[in-house]
Image: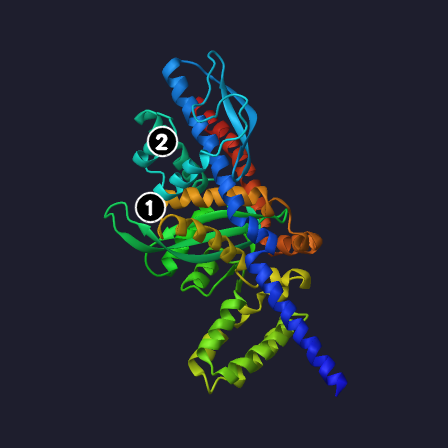
């Protein structure tokens, strides 16, 4: 009896630890949650001030004929923490940004008002001008235009940015938000598709985001994947996503050598929605045993048996699961130590939670796609300086195996690349010989 109680207590403790681990995975640890809002505001204010000062210098040089002469570093203490500012200089005149506090003054709380106003007003020129005037910063309409254009440039530079040819993994997920339509002025619901990559040096990075109206479909996904290809992406070992309509077919068309893993968190929710409580509980228990198999083939065989066991009771649902059974178990093709990082879209969902904070502080909706884009870029900058700055140690640990998987997966692609290069060289040589022949004919 004591043994049984001890075993039950052990299972209970394990379950609590599993729950705590899941909370930490989704929300971060307690210290991170406490600093989350403050650090986001600090980073946003820092980036905004640097861009405003640089924009003012551009206006100053246009007006005076002076030229830029680099930057110098300055710290400024605010209620959100110490800001690391890059103050612009000019060569001929003693330029000093109006936004900067008086010399030798290292503390200023008034910038918090500027930050909150920028967030709430959505960077509109009129509201931005009013906010700056309240701080005794009387920028001209032309200078305001320069500042807002520089902020928007952040967004447009990103969406056109060239991508590396190789990524180990990309996570794709959708996030529904309210956004004001520029043409009609009405607030509408849109879906943001974010694409987060794992590079071959095992760092996370945002490589694309797309704002679309309506429901997901194949044409929409073809547009997203085609844009990634157009910006340079060629080879991806694995794509992790939810079961979006049309995405599976789009991947097969544009990334035929790439593995596709469907999110298992969403899969388990679908099980609960489509099966009785008792059946879904047993189905999940057996599926969890399938997940810990050593090989893809063995896991697939067990999974097929589980689906067939319930096919009469849930014919339509099991037919859908059968159709995508391989995509649910793709992670089993990879080393055990990284599997839990490639069978959910938690990375994407965590990023969306950061955007949700901005949406709530903007009155429940984004003022425009450009405003949304600016906030996404600011989030990316913060992550790149923090959690995303270092390689994932789990991927790094299996670097040799993962690089071999990636290389072997695209060996035909590399061979074709070499053959095309050889063909170009042969064509160049043949072209020279052809010209010689044509010249001889003309001489005769």
Secondary-structure class at tag 2: helix
Q: State whether residue 234 appears in this view.
A: no
Secondary-structure class at tag 1: loop
Single out the residue that lies furthest toward the top: 92
Q: Name the residue at 47% across, 14% down.
A: 94
Single out the residue that lies furthest toward the left: 184
Locate residue 148: give its quadrant: top left
Q: Which mark sits nearer the N-terminus, 1 or 2?
A: 2
Residue 14 falls left or right of residue 278:
right
Q: How far apart are marks 1 and 2 (CA)?
A: 22 Å
Q: Position of residue 24 (x, y in %)?
A: 59, 60
Q: Where is residue 302 in the image (x, y as percent from the top left)?
A: 61, 78
Residue annotated with mark 1: 367
The residue closer to the viewer here, 426 or 29, is 29
Q: Position of residue 191 (x, y in %)?
A: 38, 56
Residue 294 falls left or right of residue 329:
right
Mark 1 neighbour density, 10 Å: few (under 14) some (14–19) many (20 or more): many
Q: Do the residues labelled 1 and 2 touch (CB within 8 Å)?
A: no
Mark 2 neighbour density, 10 Å: few (under 14) some (14–19) many (20 or more): few
Q: State whether residue 430 appears in this view.
A: yes
The residue closer to the viewer here, 132 or 51, is 132
Pick the quarter of the image with the N terminus.
Answer: bottom right
Residue annotated with mark 2: 134
Single out the residue that lies furthest toward the right: 3
Q: Name the residue at 73% across, 85% down.
A: 4
Residue 110 lies, with reference to residue 249, above or below; the image says: above
Depth check, mark 1 against mark 2: the one in front is 2
């Amino acid at each position: 009896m004591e043994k049984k109680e001890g075993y039950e207590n052990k299972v209970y403790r394990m379950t609590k630890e599993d729950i705590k681990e899941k909370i930490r995975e989704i929300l971060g640890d307690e210290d991170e949650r406490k600093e989350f809002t403050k650090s986001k505001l600090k980073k946003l204010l820092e980036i905004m001030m640097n861009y405003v000062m640089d924009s003012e210098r551009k206006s100053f040089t246009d007006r005076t004929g002076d030229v830029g002469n680099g930057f110098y570093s300055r710290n400024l203490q605010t209620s959100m923490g110490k800001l690391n500012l890059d103050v612009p200089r000019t060569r001929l005149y003693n330029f000093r940004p109006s936004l900067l506090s008086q010399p030798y003054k290292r503390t200023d709380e008034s910038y918090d008002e500027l930050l909150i106003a920028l967030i709430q007003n959505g960077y509109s020129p009129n509201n931005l001008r009013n906010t700056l005037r309240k701080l005794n910063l009387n920028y001209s309409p032309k200078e305001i235009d320069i500042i807002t254009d520089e902020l928007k440039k952040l967004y447009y530079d990103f969406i056109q940015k060239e991508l590396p040819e190789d990524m180990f993994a990309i996570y794709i997920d959708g996030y529904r938000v309210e956004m004001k339509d520029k043409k009609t002025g009405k607030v509408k619901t849109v879906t943001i598709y974010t694409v987060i990559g794992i590079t071959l040096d095992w760092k996370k990075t945002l490589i694309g985001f797309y704002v679309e109206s309506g429901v997901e479909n194949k044409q929409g996904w073809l547009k997203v994947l085609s844009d990634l290809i157009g910006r340079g992406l060629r080879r991806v070992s694995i794509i992790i996503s939810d079961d979006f309509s049309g995405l599976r077919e789009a991947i097969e068309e544009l990334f035929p050598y790439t593995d596709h893993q469907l999110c298992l968190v969403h899969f388990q929710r679908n099980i609960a929605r489509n099966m009785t409580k008792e059946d879904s509980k047993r189905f999940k228990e057996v599926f969890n045993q399938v997940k810990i198999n050593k090989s893809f083939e063995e896991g697939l065989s067990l999974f097929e048996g589980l689906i067939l066991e319930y096919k009469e009771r849930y014919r339509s649902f099991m037919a859908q699961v059968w159709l995508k059974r391989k995509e649910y178990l793709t992670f089993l093709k990879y080393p055990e130590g990284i599997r839990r990082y490639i069978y959910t879209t938690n990375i994407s969902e965590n990023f969306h939670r950061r955007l949700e904070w901005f949406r709530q502080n903007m009155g429940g909706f984004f003022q425009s796609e450009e405003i949304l884009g600016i906030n996404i870029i600011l989030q990316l900058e913060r992550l790149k300086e923090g959690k995303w700055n270092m390689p994932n140690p789990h991927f790094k640990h299996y670097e040799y195996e993962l690089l071999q998987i990636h290389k072997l997966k695209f060996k035909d692609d590399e061979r074709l690349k070499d053959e095309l290069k050889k063909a170009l060289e042969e064509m160049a040589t043949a072209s020279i010989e052809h010209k010689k022949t044509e010249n001889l004919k003309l001489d005769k």
